[in-house]
Amino acid sequence: MKIPVFEEIILTDFKYDHLKSLFADSKIGKVPTYINLSILKKSDLNSIIELLESVFEDLKLHSRFPYPTYLISHLPAESSFPLVSSTKELPDHFFKKVKRPNNKELQLLNKLDLKVDKLTNLDSIKILENFEETSFPQRVLFELSKELYFLEKIYKHLNDKTHEKQKK
C-alpha cells in the first residue's frame, strides 16, 4: 500500500452516470481526496452536492471513512462531506512528501490497508445511525450519573459534619 496523500478528483461533467463511473474508478476511500467546487455558483452548488451524495450512496462510499473526501467551496452549504474554503485548510498530515518507507512502516501500511478494506466492507451509514441513536441516551445517563455523584459527595460531606458535631 502506498502512503495516503491527497488526490484531487477533477470533475469535468456533472452528469450522474459520468460521476458514478469516475468515482468507481478513482481511489475515493482508499486515499484522502478532495473535489474543488469553488467555481460553482450558490444555486448550482447545492444541487451538485446532492448529486455527489447520491452517487456516494449508490456506490456505498462514505464521505468521511476510511479516508475523507473534502469539498472545496467558498460558499457555505449543507453537506455530509467535510467542507473547506481552500486547499490551505486541508489537513497537513496528508500532504507529506512521499518517500520510500522502511520495513516497519511497510508493515504498518499493510495493516492499515487491511483495516481500510474492513471499513469499506462495513455498512458505515447504518453504523453511524446506530451510533447517533445510542449516543444521546448515553450522554443523558452520563449527565445524570455525574449529578448523582455530586449529590452523593455533598451528602457524605454533610453527614461527616453532623457526626463531628454530635461527637463534640
Image (cartoon, grey):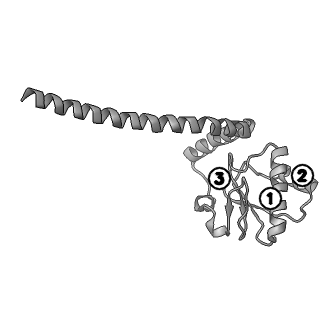
Q: Position of residue 110 (x, y in %)?
A: 64, 41
Residue 54 is left or right of residue 102, and the answer is: right
Do the residues bearing badges 1 and 2 touch, measured as CB atoms within 8 Å?
A: no
Residue beneath the point at 83% across and 52% down: 23
In the image: residue 24, left or right of residue 33: right
Q: Which residue is mark 3?
A: 3
Q: Rounded to the nearest whole Å, what is the CA distance between mark 2 and mark 3? A: 25 Å
Q: Which residue has dot 1 on it?
A: 49
Tag in front: 2 or 3: 2
Residue at (57, 47) in percent of width and height: 105
Question: Considering only order in the chain, which callout, 3 or 2, is on the residue closer to the N terminus?
Answer: 3
Q: Residue at x 67, y 40 (%)?
A: 128
Disc 1 or 2, which lies upstream in sequence? 2
Q: Residue at x 68, y 52 (%)?
A: 68
Q: Which residue is mark 2?
A: 21
Residue lying at the far left of the rendered structure:
168
Tell me the SS state at disc 3.
loop
- Amino acid at circle 3: Ile
Q: Quadrant of the C terminus?
A: top left
